[in-house]
């Protein structure tokens, strides 16, 4: 491939620019037309943007048995959650879930169950921050729950848990017709695309698997739109540049593809520049330990440091225990920070056999698993009737307790 | 000052590799320098990791100085030998010649594009150079070994969970995937050895280096494939502008970028072999292919892909076609008959219509998964690849006639096709396909194919544009100025 020749390239460049513009205009018209065809209206009165997970027509059946309430999600996310006591928090999407709600202005829940004792409740975290999730509770009215959220300070970010809180007496069944997060005004699909395509997305824990810039909601992603526009432009260009020399046509073609690619890349660079600024503000000028403490799992790093300082384990084992499936991430991070101690993740085995625990070993119990209890007076750590070992409490960090194995075992 | 020591480690490996590659491809034009720099990094890092692994296997302790000394000695020898050889080689300075003949706007474009690439590298460097270990698999698989080795100063073993529980001495460690290949942990160990402690930020410097090295590697390959400097820089920009490549360099810790880069380097070496008519580059491609199996478990399959490409390059088109057809028939026969062997030292090799169990790869059942739409959707959504995939499909389809008549284009085409077939087989035909529903593996699985596609694209394009009557050049193909 050679570059454009010195002479006679101007008409080809002009043809390329014209074709590119025409391609983009045609693509925009085509997409708008498709949106019109699909929704029957160019600028829909009702915004139809549904956040991340598809929450429409989510059916949840709740069955009461004594003091417990079982809420079963039917379609499209089957699942089951059990709640004890007089109030329950039922996840409509099997939770905890994460739904990106940036740009959504109001939330609505249509439920057959009515009454002021029921509320729509969720935890949400402001975009781009590591601040703790904020709880928001919206009481049910006659037709369900509805709230305008766009004017709440800091609104927009990630919803972690979304569900219905039933605080009063429980009914035998409840069906949720719809639970939707909506945009706060009637924008066209193109307008939504525009805001989506150019939104800045900071690193998330899923970035390494799929860094997602457009939320698209069933419509065409920007890369596809640009590709279609480029294909149209190439077609137009090849038509109008028939008389141009082959090499010039080729150069024009390459330039059009490169320009379209540059458009996408510019958005990405913009996004990354914002991310780098955020990273700079968070981490610059700090030593490694400070950066770890400021990171999302800072408390885990702090715990590991304290264990290592207090341990003096000298090659002794550190057993890590939790019975919550979602504790895996905490345990793996704690395991890593504990190296070069000798940690062992007991999550899969759950209980510790006496023959594996030697005096001096440590046991870290994370997030208060119900099945593990400690008898301080007798220095006994018990696993729900499955095993008992001699252990004294070394430290209590709230979300984690650390024990040192003693002898003899009971 | 200490923070610079890991940079010294990387620089030593890179320098040794670059000087060795310079021996294989002497010259001082932009294309030569780019190949020396780009491929030099991958050669140097593979050589270094082999040395460090040698120390580990031979129980020679964990020392930075001896390895550094070997690299310095190698660099000095290669430099001396290279000078003697360079006396008789050209120094055409292709870029300079091109710039003197090109229009101002072309030179301006070249500089602007170079600045754009530089800005991207700076962004990656800033992110990876500030943020402590963030990537999940880094915590889980790729960094624990390096951390233990560095902090204890001993080559301690990692064993299975049951092995750990049965070892009362507690002399070994355990992690979930204790048996994963050790190339990436060894890279981290080498880089952090002079610090003598684990560092959650500087461990990621090699990932930045991989990202940087991809630029000259892609540029040099494209130049030798017949691209002008501007077009070659466009190719390099195309590669590093892929958002998913950017993410894996900016959030270091995963092995996928390493695997992708070595697959790309192997494919690029084969393209260089085609344009330079030098068998030594075929050998280098094969070596880089073998390194792939040392990086990640799926690397074993990518190694086979690379070796397939090597065969396709070495053999005439008809023989390649017969071999491919024969391989499919043989596979079908083996599947129907069923094979179940136990190879000493390697493990079980079983293949039947129910599934397969292979050393390194693991055990999977055959299972047809309707995941085309899911894969397609994931590859097009989210802005991870811009529009690389549809563009590649078009270019590779147009390139079929060229692949039939040109050995380099054929190797390019077959490499991409074999890579795509491997991914197809893994996700559509095996129980592994269930994992594709989440976005956890799709993009990472396609990363090597993306880098391979960009590295081979110039050879395919050049062969496609070459007039049909004109055979590929029988002589060594130096980049045009």
Image (cartoon, rainbow, N blue to C red):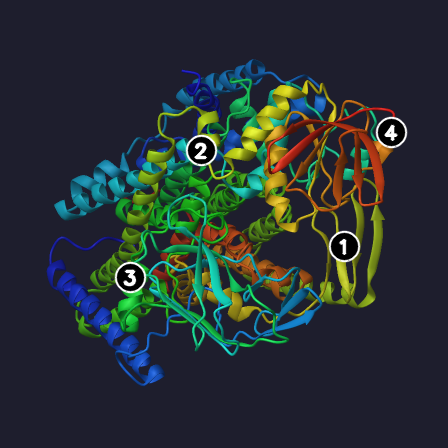
Dot 3 alpha-carbon crowd within 10 angstroms: few under 14, some 14 to 19, many 20 or more: some
Dot 1 alpha-carbon crowd within 10 angstroms: few under 14, some 14 to 19, many 20 or more: some
Q: CA distance from mark 3 to mark 2?
A: 31 Å
Q: Chain of mark 2?
A: A
Residue B90 x, y percent position in the rendering: 32, 31
Apparent side of residue B102 relative to residue A400 in the rendered image (left or right): left
Query: Which residue position is annotated with label 3?
Result: A195
Dot 4 alpha-carbon crowd within 10 angstroms: few under 14, some 14 to 19, many 20 or more: some
Mark in front: 1 vs 4: 4
Q: Which mark is residue A294?
A: 2
Mark in front: 2 vs 4: 4
Q: Which residue is at a point 44% across and 33% down the rendered structure image?
A: A294
Q: Chain of mark 3?
A: A
Mark in front: 2 vs 1: 2
Lower position in the chain sequence, tag 4 or tag 3 = 3
Q: CA distance from mark 2 to mark 1?
A: 45 Å
Query: Which residue position is annotated with label 4?
Result: A409
Q: Which residue is at a point 17% across and 44% down the rendered structure image?
A: B108
Query: Which residue position is annotated with label 1?
Result: B357
Can residue B127 be seen at all in this image of the molecule? yes
Lower position in the chain sequence, tag 3 or tag 2 = 3
Cβ–Cβ under 8 Å for marks 2 and 4: no
Mark in front: 4 vs 3: 4
Mark 3: which secondary structure?
A: helix
Q: Chain of mark 1?
A: B
Q: Chain of mark 4?
A: A
Mark 1: which secondary structure?
A: strand
Q: CA distance from mark 3 to mark 1?
A: 49 Å
Mark 4: which secondary structure?
A: loop
Q: Nearer the viewer, residue A116 or B302?
A: A116
């Amino acid at each position: 491939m050679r570059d454009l020749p010195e002479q006679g390239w101007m008409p080809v460049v002009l043809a390329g620019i014209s074709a590119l513009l025409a391609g983009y205009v045609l693509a925009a018209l085509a997409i708008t037309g498709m949106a019109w065809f699909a929704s029957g209206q160019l600028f829909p009165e009702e915004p139809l943007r549904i956040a991340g997970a598809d929450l429409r027509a989510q059916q949840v059946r709740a069955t009461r048995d004594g003091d417990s309430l079982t809420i079963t999600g039917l379609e499209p996310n089957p699942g089951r959650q059990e709640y004890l006591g007089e109030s329950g928090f039922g996840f409509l999407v099997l939770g905890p879930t994460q739904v990106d709600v940036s740009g959504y202005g109001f939330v609505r829940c249509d439920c057959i169950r009515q009454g002021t004792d029921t509320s729509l409740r969720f935890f949400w975290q402001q975009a781009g921050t590591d601040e703790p999730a904020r709880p928001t509770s919206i009481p049910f009215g006659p037709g369900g729950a509805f709230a305008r959220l766009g004017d709440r300070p800091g609104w927009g970010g990630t919803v972690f848990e979304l569900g219905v809180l039933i605080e009063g007496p429980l009914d035998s069944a409840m069906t949720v017709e719809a639970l939707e997060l909506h945009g706060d005004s009637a924008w066209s699909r193109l307008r939504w695309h525009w805001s989506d395509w150019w939104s800045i997305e900071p690193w998330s824990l899923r970035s390494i698997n799929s860094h997602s810039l457009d939320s698209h909601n069933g419509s065409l992603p920007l890369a596809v739109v640009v590709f279609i526009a480029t294909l149209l432009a190439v077609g137009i260009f090849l038509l109008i540049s028939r008389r141009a020399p082959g090499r010039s046509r080729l150069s024009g073609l390459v330039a059009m593809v490169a320009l379209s690619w540059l458009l996408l890349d510019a958005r990405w660079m913009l996004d990354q520049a914002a991310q780098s600024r955020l990273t700079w503000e968070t981490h610059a000028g700090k030593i490694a330990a400070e950066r770890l403490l400021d990171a999302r799992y800072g408390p885990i790093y702090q715990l590991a440091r304290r264990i290592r300082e207090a341990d003096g384990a000298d090659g002794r084992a550190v057993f890590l225990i939790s019975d919550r499936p979602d504790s895996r991430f905490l345990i793996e991070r704690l395991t890593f920070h504990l190296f070069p101690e000798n940690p062992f993740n007991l999550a899969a085995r759950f209980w510790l056999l006496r023959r594996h625990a030697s005096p001096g070993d440590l046991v870290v119990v994370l997030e208060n698993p119900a099945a593990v209890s400690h008898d301080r007076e007798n220095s006994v750590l018990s696993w729900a009737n499955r095993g008992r070992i001699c252990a004294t409490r070394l430290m209590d960090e709230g979300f984690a307790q650390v024990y040192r194995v003693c002898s003899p075992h009971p | 000052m200490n923070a610079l020591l890991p940079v010294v480690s990387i620089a030593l490996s890179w320098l040794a590799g670059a000087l060795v590659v310079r021996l294989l491809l002497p010259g001082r034009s932009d294309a030569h320098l780019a190949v020396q720099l780009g491929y030099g990094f991958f050669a140097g890092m593979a050589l270094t990791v082999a040395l460090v692994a040698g120390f580990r296997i031979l129980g020679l302790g964990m020392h930075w100085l001896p390895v550094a000394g070997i690299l310095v000695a190698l660099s000095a020898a290669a430099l001396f030998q290279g000078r003697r050889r360079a006396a008789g080689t050209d120094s055409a300075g292709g870029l300079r010649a091109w710039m003197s003949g090109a229009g101002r706007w072309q030179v301006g474009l070249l500089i602007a594009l170079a600045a754009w690439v530089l800005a991207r590298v700076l962004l990656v460097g800033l992110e990876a150079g500030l943020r402590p270990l963030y990537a999940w698999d880094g915590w889980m698989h790729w960094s624990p070994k390096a951390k233990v080795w560095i902090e204890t100063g001993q080559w301690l073993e990692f064993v299975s969970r049951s092995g750990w529980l049965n070892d009362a001495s507690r002399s070994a460690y355990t992690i979930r995937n204790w048996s994963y290949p050790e190339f990436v942990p060894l890279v981290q160990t080498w880089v952090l050895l002079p610090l003598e402690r684990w560092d959650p930020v500087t461990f990621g410097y090699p990932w930045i280096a991989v990202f940087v090295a991809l630029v000259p590697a892609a540029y040099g390959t494209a130049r030798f494939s017949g691209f002008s400097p501007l077009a070659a820089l466009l190719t390099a920009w195309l590669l590093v502008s892929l958002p998913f490549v950017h993410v894996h360099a900016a959030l270091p810790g995963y092995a996928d970028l390493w695997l992708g880069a070595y697959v790309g380097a192997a494919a690029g070496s084969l393209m260089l072999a085609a344009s330079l008519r030098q068998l030594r580059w075929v050998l280098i491609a094969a070596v880089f292919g073998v390194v792939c199996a040392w990086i990640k478990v799926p690397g074993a399959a990518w190694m086979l892909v690379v070796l397939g490409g090597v065969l396709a390059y070495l053999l005439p088109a008809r023989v390649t076609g017969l071999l491919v057809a024969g391989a499919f028939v043989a596979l079908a026969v083996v599947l129907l008959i069923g094979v179940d062997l136990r190879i000493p030292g390697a493990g079980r090799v079983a293949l039947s219509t129910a599934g397969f169990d292979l050393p390194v790869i693991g055990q999977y059942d055959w299972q047809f998964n309707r995941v085309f739409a899911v894969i397609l959707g994931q590859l097009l959504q989210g802005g991870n690849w811009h529009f690389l995939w549809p563009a590649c499909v078009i270019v590779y389809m147009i390139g079929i006639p060229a692949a039939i008549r040109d050995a380099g284009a054929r190797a390019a085409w077959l490499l991409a096709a074999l890579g795509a077939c491997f991914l197809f087989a893994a996700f559509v035909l095996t129980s592994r396909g269930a994992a594709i529903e989440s976005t956890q593996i799709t993009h990472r699985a396609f990363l090597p194919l993306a880098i391979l596609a960009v590295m081979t694209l110039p050879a395919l394009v050049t062969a496609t544009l070459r007039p049909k009557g004109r055979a590929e050049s029988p002589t060594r193909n130096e980049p045009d100025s």
